[in-house]
Every structure is written in structure tokens, then in C-alpha cells.
């Protein structure tokens, strides 16, 4: 009896020491590593955020994979394949990071293909034209970079390290997209119209990638206190718009928001309200492509099951042979 | 506790830790982890996942479950305290500051 009691005391004093150490790490802006004590809420928040991020990279392959066979030249096809392959890699880096928090990969895959997990709502929009490959690179990867650069300093070590690797690769994604649009804008009337029409569709959803406005984002404060998030949704969105406006000028496209105007006093561009009702609809699963994205992912996972099992059986058989010989 | 990334679970394939040598003369450095059925596939997957832009000229893979790590809770007592051991550093010896090539 007294032994049990001692064990409990030991555990709670260990927790206390762990909590103090955790607070000290955050206060000194140091990194938390997998074997460190961490609050349950911190662990849960990270598992949710990192796995959702991983799912977004994996689902994000579909809207672009859609154009690999129809890219207008061999060079564009090679570039697009390289980019989609990068996104697969990003997903894998992030799944690995999430796993260090104590969730296994099969569980994350299941959450994705059963529709239980969320992923970035941007990937539920369709890609009907080649110009969409340009808009995704310029606007979607552009917004992702804006979001991800501060995450390289996230307090959780494995997440930060995955983000450093990802950010290095993302700048190629944005540049190749910008170049696609630039070439279209230097082309025929029809090509310019295609580029503009595509930018019209992607602009607002890309801005929504930063998440709801600060006063409607209840978990942001806690994430910032934990040094996971470094800037608020609205701050990042503003930073993105400020970068986009001069880039759009170089492209010669018009951003589809009549309220964009330089504000001398703020030193930023003003811009119009976004349609948050649409954002919540798409996030809730009612976007134009939610069903097909998850169904495709599920089919790929199920169709690949025999390969995974066969490779495993082969490895096991070889191991048995090795032991026997 | 073995590898920091290995939490068991119901994986079809085991977890591997990947080490990449970026160029001759440098050590293999931990790049990350991946799942693969065996060592041959682990090396191939590592090539595809961690060296898509000529980041490496050599790869090591190690089964995560084969790594033995130091006890994270014994950090304080396990690693020697640097307190009061300044004499292990060259900067401790100040009287020779003005002597050339020392
Ligand atoms: Fe990515
Ligand atoms: Fe990307």
C-alpha cells in the first residue's frame, strides 16, 4: 500500500519537474523534443495540426496530378511531376513528425480515408484549366510558404525540422507557377483570358488558407503561447496580400478584389472582406471536390494494400531464411 | 525507449532512421525516418525521399527499433556537468594570450 503511494508521489513530482522544464524551454524559446515531458493539450494540438498538414500535402497532389498527362510540353510535364513528388515527400516528412508524438501512421491514414480528419480546404477546389497549375503554384504554394516559414521556428523540434526541409523545396513550386502564368500572360488573347479567369477563382480561397479572422480563431492564442504559431492568421494574410499586389502587376493580372488599395497610414494594402460562409461550407465537406478527393485517396490506399502486404511477406520470408542458414 | 520516432503501433512496415552523407569528407547526418519492408527498400525509399536534389552521395538506414538511446530523464546525472570545468577549454589559459602561435 505504502509502495503504491510512493509511486504516485514520484510520478506527480516527475510531472511537476517536467512541467517546470517545459515552461523553461518555452520561455527561452528553445525546442521541445519527443522524449521531453509535455502537456497533453500541447501533444494533442500538435498531433492534430501536423497530421492535418500531412493530409493536406497528400490530398494536394490530386488537383495537380490531374494535369500531368496533359501538360503542354515535356518540360512542363517533368516540372509538374517533380512538384507533385515533392508534395508526397512533404506529407511523409510530416507523418514522421506526427508519429514522434505517439500516433501511428495507420491511424492517420484511416482518419484521412474515412473522412474523420480535416485537411486544407483549398484542395477541394477543381482544376479545370492548365492556368490553374500556374495559380496553384503562385497563390496556393505562395500562401503555404507564408504560413510555413514561421513554422520552421515552431517549438516542437521534429515539426520545425520538417518545415525547414519543406520550405527549401516550396520556393521552386511558387516560381514555376508564377512562370506558367507569366508565359500565358505573354501569349494570345485566349491565353491571357485563361490566366485571368484562373486567378479570379483561386485568389480568395488562397487568402482563406490562413484560417478564419483572428477574432473567430479561438485556438490561435494558445498556439501562440506554446510558440507553435508565431503570427496571427490576419497578420499572415496581410503579409501575403502585400506581396501579391506588386507580383500581380508584374504578371499583368488583376486581383479580383475592388477594395485593394494602398493605405499610407498603415503601410499595408487594404483589401475586402472574404466569404467565410463559403470557407466553413468547404471545410465541412461541402466543397466542389471533397468527396472525390477522399474517395481517390481511399481507393489508392486500398489498391496498394496487396503491394504493402506482399513486400512485408517477402521481407519476413527472407529474414526467416537468414536465421535458418 | 528506442528511437525517438518509434512508438510501435500497428504499422504494416517497420520504421527506419535515415542518415545522409552530403559530400565526401563529411559525416552521415540524421535526415529523418521512413517506413519500408526491408533494408533494400529502405535505402531506395530514402533516396527518393531525402535526396531528390543531390543532397547526398551515401545513405545509411537503421531499423528504429535497433537504436539504443540514453535515458532522457537522467539527462542531468548522465552527462557530466560543465560547471567548474572551464579548464577543459583552451580559453581557460589566459596567461599565454600574448604568445604567438599558441
Ligand atoms: Fe508542400
Ligand atoms: Fe508545394
Image (cartoon, helix red, strand yellow):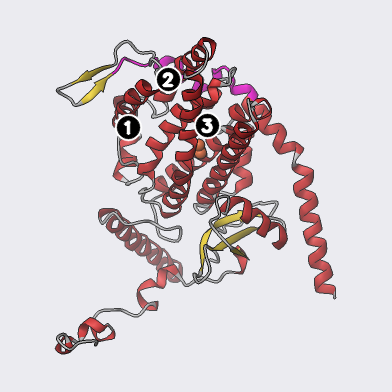
Disc 2 is attached to a residue of which chain?
A
Q: Do the numbered discs 2 and 1 sit on residues whose CB atoms are within 8 Å?
A: no
Measured along the vertical axis of the image, is residue B80 above or below residue A203? Answer: below
Categorize mark 2 by other alpha carbons within 10 Å: few (<14), some (14-19), many (20+).
many
Q: Residue A267's quadrant in the figure? A: top left
Q: Is residue A90 left or right of residue A78?
A: left
Q: How many marks?
A: 3
Categorize mark 1 by other alpha carbons within 10 Å: few (<14), some (14-19), many (20+).
some
Horizontal and vertical percent position of residue A169: 48, 44
Q: Residue at x 38, y 51 (%)?
A: A39
**Residue A236: numbered disc:** 1
Foreground label between 2 and 3 = 2
Disc 3 is attached to a residue of which chain?
A
Residue B84 visible at all: no
The magenta segment is A271-292
> SS for tag 1?
helix
> SS for tag 2?
helix
Is residue B52 one of those drawn in magenta? no
Residue A275 visible at all: yes
Give the mark nearest the N terminus, 2 or 1: 2
Is residue A285 one of those drawn in magenta? yes
Label 2 belongs to which residue? A203
Q: Cα distance, mark 1 to mark 3?
A: 21 Å
Measured along the vertical axis of the image, is residue B10 above or below residue A212? Answer: below
Label 3 belongs to which residue? A118
Q: Nearer the viewer, residue A126 or A19?
A: A126
Disc 1 is attached to a residue of which chain?
A
> SS for tag 3?
loop
Amino acid at each position: 500500500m505504502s509502495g503504491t503511494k510512493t509511486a504516485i508521489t514520484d510520478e506527480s513530482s516527475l510531472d511537476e519537474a517536467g512541467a517546470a522544464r517545459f515552461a523553461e524551454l518555452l520561455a527561452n524559446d528553445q525546442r521541445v523534443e519527443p522524449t521531453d515531458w509535455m502537456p497533453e493539450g500541447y501533444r494533442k494540438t500538435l498531433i492534430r495540426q501536423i497530421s492535418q498538414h500531412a493530409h493536406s500535402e497528400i490530398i494536394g497532389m490530386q488537383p495537380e496530378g490531374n494535369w500531368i498527362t496533359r501538360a503542354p510540353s515535356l518540360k512542363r510535364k517533368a516540372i509538374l511531376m517533380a512538384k507533385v513528388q515533392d508534395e508526397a515527400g512533404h506529407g511523409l516528412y510530416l507523418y514522421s513528425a506526427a508519429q514522434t508524438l505517439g500516433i501511428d501512421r495507420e491511424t492517420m491514414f484511416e482518419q484521412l480515408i474515412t473522412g474523420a480528419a480535416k485537411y486544407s480546404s483549398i484542395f477541394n477546389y477543381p482544376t479545370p484549366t492548365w492556368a490553374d497549375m500556374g495559380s496553384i503554384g503562385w497563390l496556393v504554394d505562395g500562401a503555404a510558404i507564408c504560413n510555413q516559414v514561421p513554422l520552421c521556428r515552431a517549438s516542437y523540434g521534429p515539426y520545425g525540422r520538417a518545415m525547414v526541409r519543406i520550405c527549401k523545396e516550396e520556393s521552386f513550386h511558387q516560381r514555376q507557377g508564377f512562370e506558367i502564368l507569366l508565359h500565358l500572360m505573354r501569349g494570345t488573347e485566349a491565353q491571357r483570358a485563361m490566366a485571368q479567369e484562373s486567378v479570379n477563382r483561386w485568389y480568395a480561397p488562397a487568402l482563406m488558407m490562413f484560417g478564419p479572422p483572428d477574432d473567430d480563431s479561438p485556438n490561435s492564442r494558445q498556439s501562440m503561447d506554446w510558440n507553435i504559431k508565431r503570427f496571427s492568421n490576419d497578420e499572415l494574410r496581410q503579409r501575403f496580400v502585400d506581396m501579391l499586389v506588386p507580383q500581380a502587376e508584374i504578371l499583368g493580372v488583376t486581383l479580383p478584389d475592388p477594395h485593394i488599395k494602398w493605405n499610407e497610414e498603415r503601410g499595408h494594402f487594404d483589401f475586402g472582406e472574404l466569404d467565410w460562409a463559403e470557407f466553413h461550407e468547404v471545410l465541412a465537406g461541402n466543397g466542389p471536390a471533397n468527396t472525390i478527393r477522399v474517395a481517390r485517396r481511399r481507393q489508392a490506399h486500398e489498391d496498394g494494400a496487396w503491394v504493402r502486404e506482399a513486400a512485408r511477406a517477402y521481407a519476413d520470408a527472407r529474414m526467416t531464411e537468414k536465421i535458418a542458414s | 525507449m528506442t528511437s525517438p520516432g518509434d512508438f510501435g503501433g500497428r504499422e504494416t512496415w517497420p520504421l527506419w532512421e535515415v542518415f545522409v552523407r552530403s559530400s565526401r569528407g563529411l559525416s552521415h547526418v540524421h535526415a529523418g525516418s521512413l517506413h519500408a519492408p526491408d533494408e533494400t527498400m529502405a535505402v531506395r525509399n530514402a533516396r527518393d525521399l531525402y535526396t531528390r536534389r543531390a543532397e547526398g552521395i551515401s545513405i545509411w538506414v537503421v531499423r528504429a527499433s535497433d537504436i539504443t538511446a540514453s535515458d532522457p530523464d537522467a539527462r542531468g546525472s548522465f552527462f557530466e556537468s560543465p560547471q567548474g570545468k572551464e579548464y577543459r577549454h583552451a580559453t581557460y589559459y589566459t596567461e599565454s594570450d600574448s604568445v604567438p602561435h599558441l
